[in-house]
Image (cartoon, grey):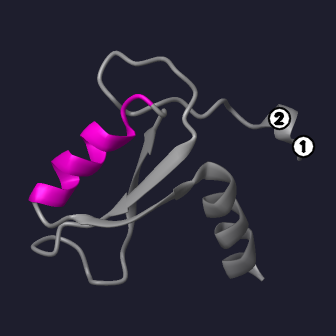
Amino acid sequence: MTSEDLPALVCSAKGCTASAVWVLAWNNPKLHTPERRKTWLACDGHREHLSSFLGVRGFLKDVVTTAEWEARQRGSDS
């Protein structure tokens, strides 16, 4: 599979159609085990807003570029 075969990554902010460049990894400790990570995608314009939303709730665990996230996922698959 090539990068052309993959769907475009789009920002998770409501109504935004911009390309995502950030992955916000999070979990809700009341619902998820500590190692579980859910993800939201963010464009440059919504990164801070989405990070703040998750952060004030104590859900935000990590913010990395989409390229770094994909590299981590490939590394964990081996």
Give me the residue at 59% from left, 34% from top: 9
Q: Is residue 33 above or below residue 71?
A: below
The tag on residue 5 is: 2
**Horizontal and vertical percent position of residue 17:** 48, 17
Q: Residue furthest right?
A: 2
Predominant SS of the magenta segment: helix
Residue interval drawn in magenta = 45-56
Mark 2–mark 1 Cα distance, whole angstroms, equals: 5 Å
Q: Give whichever of 23, 2 is nearer the camera.
A: 23
The residue type indicated by label 1 comes to: Thr
Give me the residue at 89% from left, 47% from top: 1
The residue type indicated by label 2 comes to: Asp
Q: Is residue 8 above or below residue 53?
A: above
Left or right: where 72 falls relative to 18:
right
Q: Is disc 1 placed on a helix, strand or loop?
A: loop
Q: Is residue 41 above or below residue 54?
A: above
Q: Is disc 2 placed on a helix, strand or loop?
A: helix
Left or right: where 13 falls relative to 76:
left
Residues at circles 2 and 1 in contact by the CB criterion of under 8 Å: yes
Q: Is residue 4 above or below residue 30?
A: above
The tag on residue 2 is: 1
Quadrant where the C terminus is found in the figure: bottom right
Give me the residue at 19% from left, 58% from top: 55
User: Which image quadrant is residue 35 in?
Assistant: bottom left
Please give the count of numbered marks on the rendered protein.
Answer: 2
Residue 51 highlighted magenta (yes or no) = yes
Give me the residue at 67% from left, 80% from top: 76
**Horizontal and vertical percent position of residue 6:** 75, 37
User: Which image quadrant is residue 4 in?
Assistant: top right
